[in-house]
Image (cartoon, rainbow, N blue to C red):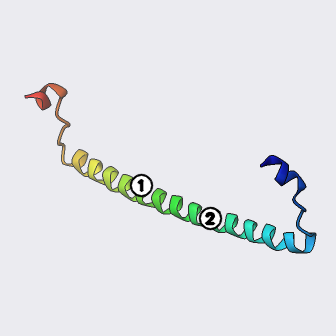
Amino acid sequence: MLHLLAEAPALPLDEAGKYVGAAYGVFVTLLVVYVAIIGARIGRVERELKELADMAEGRDALGEREPAASELVR
């Protein structure tokens, strides 16, 4: 099999350029989609974290205390 690949003619540069351009286009598209997905996830985590922080501040403002670990076991 390797012998056949060694004897296969290379693509002419005018044809190979199309494939190289298409490969770069696919790569850049996948990269943009990946960054968009990660950005959406980070935004969601930030919103949830802010919501939890607001809940904790509200609980602290009311003077409620956090239950001790021994109280949670019962």
Q: Which mark is residue 45?
A: 1
Secondary structure under tag 2 reads: helix
Q: In the image, which is nearer the foreground, mark 2 or mark 1?
A: 2
Up-down relation of residue 28 to residue 51 (above or below): below
Residue type, numbered disc 2: Leu
Q: Is residue 49 left or right of residue 27?
A: left
Circle 2 Cα neighbour tier, 10 Å, few/some/many (<14 / 14–19 / ≥20): few
Quarter location, residue 8:
bottom right
Residue type, numbered disc 1: Val
User: Could you tell which of marks 2 and 1 lies nearer the N-terminus?
Assistant: 2
**25, 55: nearer the viewer:** 25
Q: How far apart are marks 2 and 1 (CA)?
A: 23 Å
Quarter location, residue 44:
bottom left
- Name which residue lies at 90% across and 62% down: 9
Q: Name, please, the residue furthest toward the top.
A: 70
**62, 56: nearer the viewer:** 56
Instruction: Give the x, y percent position of residue 5.
Output: 83, 53
Instruction: Give the x, y percent position of residue 42.
Output: 48, 56
Secondary structure under tag 1 reads: helix
- Name which residue lies at 72% across and 70% down: 25
The mark total stands at 2
Q: Is residue 12 left or right of residue 5?
A: right
- Name which residue lies at 18% across and 29% down: 68
Quarter containing the C terminus: top left
Instruction: Give the x, y percent position of residue 59.
Output: 22, 48
Find disc 2 in the rendering and name its residue: 30
Up-down relation of residue 72 to residue 62 (above or below): above
- Name which residue lies at 52% across and 58% down: 38
Circle 1 Cα neighbour tier, 10 Å, few/some/many (<14 / 14–19 / ≥20): few
